[in-house]
Image (tube, helix red, strand yellow):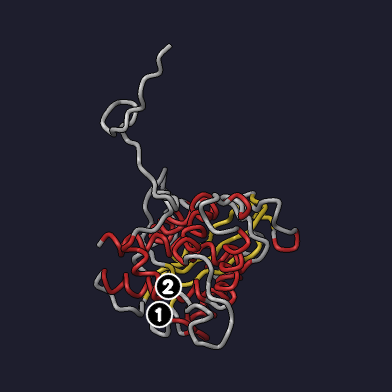
Amino acid sequence: MPVSPVCSCLSCPTHRGAVERPACGFYPSSSMTDAQWALLEPLLPPPGNTGGRGGRPEKHDRRLLVDAIFYLVRGGVAWRELPREFPPRSTVFDTFTRWLRSGAWARVHDALRDRLRIRLGRRPQPSAAIIDSQSVRAADTVAGCSRGYDAGKKINGRKRHLAVDTNGLLLAVIVTIAGIQDRDAGLRLLAQVREAFSTVTLVWADAGYAGRLVTFAAQVLAITVRVVRRADVQIGFKLLHRRWVVERTLAWISKYRRCVRDYERRLDTSEAMVHLAMIMTMSRRLART
């Protein structure tokens, strides 16, 4: 039986919608565009051999290394399951860890956030924030000493505590065991916000932060915490004043599968995954505009 020749067009029903990938691999949901790379490349740590002090030059392309990390965060795969077109997984993991320990991911995130705030017509330093928390289940890779049980949500895992500005951009994040109460972790969260942003004077929060946190913030940090409560007669879903902003940010983060469940052995690695999710979100927004 004769074999029909392979069609090379992209207009027939068989090949419509096909995307030709470069030799190095391209994944639409995680691979950076040229505009994104132009934003990120100057913010990354300089290569170790640029100062002429010895050491081997970097063997692998930095863009491929960052693309591999973005692929892992977006797809939620394990380090050993990275596709072959990326550098070796040990190299990718070592680069991620080295930049995490040096604080590079947080610095890249903060630089993109300030640039996006300016693009939105805001000043780099915010004057108000919204805080909230999110409990996520922990995978079997998370040790028992770094996980807890959230009785309210009935979740065994960890809890992310976020502070965002009025545009939903991340200002601070702290990861704890899920059993920590919001008002207790809120002390650390607001202290971190005050250390990074002396201009923040007003914070909106839900009823879980009411009580001694409000007094501590006012007397020690000079921050007014305004509790936004749900109406007693409310039926069904309704947007709550200011609180919906941080809930939308939590939804942005949950689009990245590595953040849907906590797989990390260390708390600082979990915080870095949140930073990476926001780096990908903000760099795409800046590249589009």
| Quarter holding residue 87 | bottom right
Q: Position of residue 239 (x, y in %)?
A: 37, 53
**Residue 95 placement, left or right of 168:** right
Q: Residue at x 41, y 75 (%)?
A: 43
Query: Do residues under tags 2 and 1 come within 8 Å of each other at their CB atoms?
Result: yes
Q: Residues within 10 Å of mark 2 (few under 14, many from 20)?
A: many
User: In the image as oriented, which residue stretches furthest toward the right?
Assistant: 144
Identify residue for label 1: 200
Q: Nearer the viewer, residue 142 or 77?
A: 77
Q: Amino acid at mark 1?
A: Val
Q: Nearer the viewer, residue 32 or 50?
A: 50
Q: Amino acid at mark 2?
A: Val
Q: Position of residue 273 (x, y in %)?
A: 53, 62
Q: Position of residue 249 (x, y in %)?
A: 42, 59
Label 2 sits on a secondary structure element that is strand
Q: Residues within 10 Å of mark 1 (few under 14, many from 20)?
A: many
Residue 227, compared with residue 20, is above or below; it is below
Identify residue for label 2: 203
Q: CA distance from mark 2 to mark 1?
A: 8 Å
Label 1 sits on a secondary structure element that is loop
Quadrant, the C terminus = bottom left
